[in-house]
Image: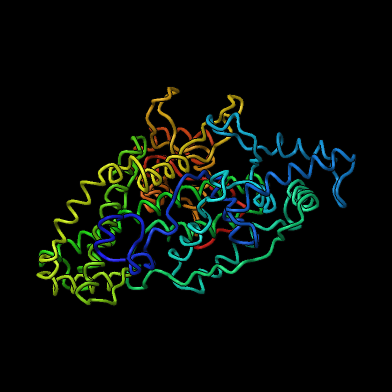
Amino acid sequence: MSLARFREEPWRTSHPAYQDSGLAMSPAPEYASSEVLLSSLYRHVGLEGATERTVPQRGREIDKDVQWYRDRHRKPEGAVLDPDAFHMLLHSVLESPKLPNQSSKRFVQVTPLVPKAAAFSGSARLSANSWPAGALVRRMIWLGSRNLPEAEATWQALFEALAVVDDDDIFARFLQAEIEAWAPSPKWGMLSANEQFTLDMDDQRNLAYPARRFARDLGSVIAAKSAMTRRQWTSLLESVLRLGAVAHVTWTCDLHARMWSCVRSALDGAGPKDIDEARALIFPRPFQFLSYGDRALPGMKDRASAFLQARLGLNATLWALDMVQEEGHGLSSAREVLDLCDRVRRNAAALATMGLGDMLAEVSERETRTLLCKKGIGSNIMEFARHVLGQRQAASPILRGYDQGFVLRKRSAGNGAPWIVGMGPVAILALVHCSLAGASGPRSVRRLSQHLSAYGISVDHRDIATNDLGHQLRMLGLVLDSPDAESGMLLVPPFPTVKQVIA
């Protein structure tokens, strides 16, 4: 790959220093839903041999196997249900609502209640080229941990929580055993994460960022498993997964835009000159991308567009530096970005002679539709954010209330109504529970406001008493009105018997 090749095909191949960066958006997000995230996470944690590529085919195979047993009036050894009952279990009892554009398609799509269900359901696409959504969650755990041992311990705890054990409710144990009888492989067993990167210790000091908040909240959700049924717990986990995933992707977009701003300034002889300045410029304090009650998608689109422009600029600069024999670049920490800026300043004249600025302007003009998120990577990011955070729009009117862990909802019933920030009851339950982790004694709604801000959601705690969030908190019994508390509202732990983890 060379600068000339990059000029012709700017999105096809990234520079190795960019591609291998610990802060790269890897894997690149595409369409997903909360259930796709959880299903893919099952496969990455403990279903060896079950990949996104194999899921659609396994779904077709299990339907064929059921028909084979039905024709012979038999059932597999160890199975309790006959073929008709098992078919009804998959296609009625456990069936997850299809989107309006999927209503006429026949495929297996079930609620990811137990690990074995993820072997044949829950891929992002019905073809064999789905993106690995679970790998994104795994990357978030590593980025949100202080060091490798902490990340590995979280991965181990997550595997143990996702497993169906004797403490799970009877339906979950029955379901895992029944699917095991009908589809014996793959077996459930912990897989190695194969992740090595955590955020630089100096960079993450005093830094509040979504992946860090998510890694802590994951511990709080795991601790709550024994207080509810398997279905309730997986719904709680899904709501934290979906908010954490989109917040992390948006934060990564912001981070890339800031890195490119530093490098672009270095092309003009400016940019950060020391490590403290570099950290202050690169890592956002605080991070915000949503405002409670306001429209959600325009702000995310702006950040996705800025990310794409940064991706073009950073890759073009790295390929250009290779041409002047300036190698050894990195983009995994503020120190490495500072070093890149120093290299750019040293070679600013050579890069200008090369016409780097004119080339970037030309490529940006040619790729306007992609940069505006109308196609390609930007469009995929927007589709990911909209479907993961938004309330599921079920094809069947009966199932419109299926999704209660959403973060975005339609302002009205019309198809063209904008998506606004408004959380569902399960999401609120999850975030109140997580916000009280490690707290001793009562806490006001300000603590919930601060917790949401760590995910990039802005809500003034003084407005909670009168807005939709306050109304939902009262309906769910999660607050007590107290004249001594700020805004007159104290948070009530939704699961008081759970021993909270330290946040």
The residue at the point 75 percent across, 47 percent down is 175
Number of labels in the image equals: 0
The residue at the point 90 percent across, 39 percent down is 73
Residue 145: image x %, image y %?
Answer: 46, 67
Looking at the image, which is closer to me, 202 or 134? 134
Residue extending furthest toward the top: 414
Q: Is residue 423 visible?
A: yes
| Quadrant of the frame with the N terminus | bottom left
Residue 463: image x %, image y %?
Answer: 34, 37
Above or below: residue 394 compared with residue 125 = above
Residue 92: image x %, image y %?
Answer: 71, 34
- Answer with the quarter of the image where residue 206 lies: bottom left
- Give the side of residue 122 with respect to residue 242, left or right: right
Above or below: residue 330 compared with residue 363 = below
Looking at the image, which is closer to me, 276 or 369? 369
- Give the side of residue 485 with respect to residue 228, left or right: left
Q: Is residue 276 visible?
A: no
Residue 233: image x %, image y %?
Answer: 62, 48
- Answer with the quarter of the image where residue 153 lies: bottom right
- Give the side of residue 166 with respect to residue 325, left or right: right
- Give the side of residue 373 with respect to residue 65, left or right: left
